Amino acid sequence: TLYVSDSDERSVRAYDLDGKGAASKERIVVDRIDGVPDGLRTDEKGNLYVAAKEVYVYELSNGPAKLLGEIPLAETPSNLAFGDADMETLYITARTSVYRVRLGVKGALPY
């Protein structure tokens, strides 16, 4: 699945990808996001992390997206990446800082 931030509509769109990378089945999976969505990452459970006004975590596996929680920061986040040897740390970039949050869940590999 390819996820795309739509800053104009403040939503996240999803597309199915075939073996050659062709996209199909466009759909909005998260809408009415507080703030402008930017960086996106998923974890091994299929949850979606969205950098917007805060970092929002959504469950996408059972129908409409369900907000699981928020990671508040002192600054507006811009991008996200899972890291460390165990892939259980979420690194978050913001205007002047990089934040590190241990989550206890592994990030999904982007390939």
Image (cartoon, rainbow, N blue to C red):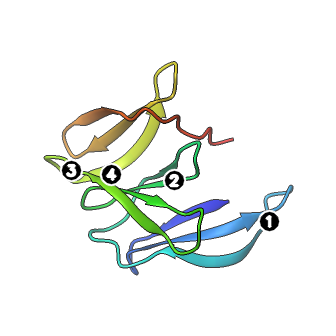
Please state which of the two labelled residues, at mark 4 or mark 3, is closer to the viewer: 3
Residue 106 at what x, y percent from top left? 52, 34
Quadrant of the rendering where the C terminus is positioned? top right
Q: Is residue 98 above or below residue 56?
A: above
Please state which of the two labelled residues, at mark 1 or mark 2, is closer to the viewer: 2
Upstream in sequence: badge 1 or badge 3: 1
Q: Which residue is mark 4?
A: 78
Upstream in sequence: badge 1 or badge 2: 1
* Residue that appears at 25% across and 45% down: 94
Q: Secondary structure at mark 4?
A: strand
Residue 27 at what x, y percent from top left? 61, 78
On residue 72, the disc is 3
Q: CA distance from mark 4 to mark 3?
A: 13 Å
Q: CA distance from mark 1 to mark 2?
A: 23 Å
Residue 22 at what x, y percent from top left? 80, 65
* Residue that appears at 51% across and 18% down: 85
Q: CA distance from mark 3 to mark 2?
A: 17 Å
> As shown in the figure, which amino acid type bears the numbered disc 1?
Ala
Q: Is residue 53 left or right of residue 46?
A: left
Q: Which residue is mark 2?
A: 47
On residue 22, the disc is 1
> As shown in the figure, which amino acid type bears the numbered disc 4?
Ser
Q: Secondary structure at mark 1?
A: loop
* Residue that appears at 43% across and 32% down: 104
Please state which of the two labelled residues, at mark 1 or mark 3, is closer to the viewer: 3
> As shown in the figure, which amino acid type bears the numbered disc 2?
Asn
